[in-house]
Image: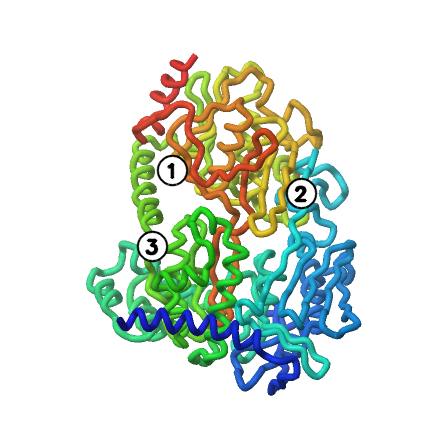
Amino acid sequence: MKRLLAVLLIFSLLLGCAVAESAAQPETTHQIEMKSFPLYLAKVDLQVDFPLYFVDGAEDLPFVELNDWKDMLLRLKRAETGESDNGYQLTVQVDETGNTVSFTRESAGNTMAFDFSQGTISFRDYVGFNLEAGAAYMDFSAFPDTDNNGQPFLISRTGLRHLYGDYTVLNLKEYGIPMIAQDGKYLVPLQTLSAFNLSNGGLGMYFNGQVLLVNKIQAMVNPRTGLLQTVLQSGSLPNELVAQIRAFEGTDAEKEAFILEELSKLSDPWPAYVEQYRQQVEESVYAWYNSAPKAMRSQALTDYAYNELCLELNCFYGLKDAHNIKDFRTFMQQSDIGLNLADPDPEKADKAVLDLTQVWFDDGHSQFVSSSWMSENDPEYDYGYSLLGQIGLISAITSARAGHPEAALPYYEVGDTAYVTFDSFAFTPGEVKGVADYYALAESDALPNDTLGIIMQAHKQITRENSPIKNVVLDLSANGGGAVPTAYFTLAWFLGEASFAVHNTFTGAEATSKIKADVNLDRQFDENDTLAGRGLHLFCLTSPKSFSCGNQVPWAFKADGSVILIGKVSGGGSCMVGFNTTAWGTSYQYSSPNQLSFVKNGAYYDLDRGADPDFVIMDYENFYDREALTEFIHSLF
């Protein structure tokens, strides 16, 4: 009965907010107070005091005036690129009624309109409005096609077909989210603006009552989490100390102090580790942000944050349909998540976000990143059935491969069969528009052991003079995904010209990119860069651990039809990772609306259920016994 009453309370809270807001008359006067706070990009002071507005006494629920937000976006775009004029332009216009404020980008038609009479925000095209200046529409290949001197670099974009997204309207009034036009000011909650203008680029706005911080969300990780994992998984600490740490009662800060004190008493390398950890905390943006005094959430913030999170997830969670979620407000009421989200205690709300992403979503991409600055302690970790199954799967694969160390080598030959293996898609950052200069590295014989370096070295071996290689196996059986551009590069290596399709579940926008890769680093894009057309038998080895890009690549192979899939069905993970924050400062990641797809007969298809192999191999032992696997491959011809 108590739980039923709590659910009814949430339901009435949600409806009450919506009814109260819709019933509000235009002449309603709010008590509004403006306060200025220093603005930081990471921990770098941007030397500006940014004005925030607080309504009706709620000092933890900041609003932003739209002209100030326009200035903020311009400042951030220039700070990110280091250029005073990088092509990004944004203008603001108020209509003749004084009810609608429109943002317009430099490209015609890309607008974001705030209708204060209707309580809505509308986008002519959400993707287009938030696109980086000069960037191709929904192009996720990311690598530059020219270096700093204008020379060809790594990839050549040979085609991009796209369908613009639908006209989109966010009905904030329906969610009880306030928009306030008063005294010549146009005020919108900070979190709403951050979510719909910045999170698509992985940025979050963090207000902790002392400063306003802009940072990469995925970098907002609590060092304390890594400390606990290190000490509990090291295997070299005294059992008595491990037991004391597990049984320790107190706040997370008190536990941290206890651990560091005890580690300092031990022999090397632990005292040095303690010093390294303290330095890490000193440099941590999250630790700096999290150092503000703890607080409970006001009722205004609690109500707003609940509804705002539901709005964002209804728009941005890419697997909403797959999870049979019609509306997140209903979902919150039907699960225990809503009870904790509606509680003013920030620790309970943080726990709700963790359970939502890791227990209910349970999709491999969604997970908790870090707690709010308001919370004294981090939530206790928990996992859904699929994630727990993945832990067991990783153990089985690791055990099977341990008996065959050659199976972990990036390149290995057995007679006429070459095996190429990498467990993630990765490239090395560097000086060429954010990417390492692989051409210079190759000249100095210093190619990195990342995905691109492995492919370049393998290609040289496979195509060498008098090469015996007739079969090439790309082993993605333990590949959990990674950087999308390297998946493009891999596909181009195998297929000659790679097609890469993305569907946006929020707006309906679609795009198919085509690229070629300069695998042999001669600044040309031709038949010498690919394994296609050489009379080779091409294979891809997959397992349920082949996830995200490790799942998308075999799907592209299946759609192309020229590469044979062997092993077990791949693990899915069709949506790219997205990052977002909550209105009280929690960070999390999720399956974004950018859904990796494959195109067949002109239609885009979801690939979350994994690609079925052409030939099934049941025993993981046979995945990694390269001699046995080579015999199996020979038996197919």
Residue 434, image x and y in percent? 64, 50
Label 2 sits on what residue type? Leu
Cα distance, mark 1 to mark 3?
18 Å
Cα distance, mark 2 to mark 1?
32 Å
Circle nearer the viewer, 2 or 3: 2
Residue at 35% x, 29% y: name it.
624
Side of 524 relative to 530 (left or right) = right
Q: Which residue is denoted by mark 2 in the rendering?
A: 163
Observer-nearest residue: 63 or 115?
A: 115
Q: Which residue is denoted by mark 1 in the rendering?
A: 544
Can you tell which quarter of the image residue 243 is in?
A: bottom left
Between discs 2 and 1, the one toward the N terminus: 2
Q: Which residue is denoted by mark 3 in the rendering?
A: 383
Observer-nearest residue: 23 or 190?
A: 23
Residue 482 visible in the snapshot: yes
Placement of the C terminus among the 4 image quadrants: top left
Q: Which mark is residue 201?
A: none
Side of 388 relative to 525 (left or right) = left
Label 3 sits on what residue type? Tyr
Between discs 2 and 3, the one toward the N terminus: 2
Residue at 44% x, 23% y: name it.
413
Residue 364, image x and y in percent? 42, 48
Image height of 204 relative to 429, above or below: below
Image height of 552 relative to 280, above or below: above
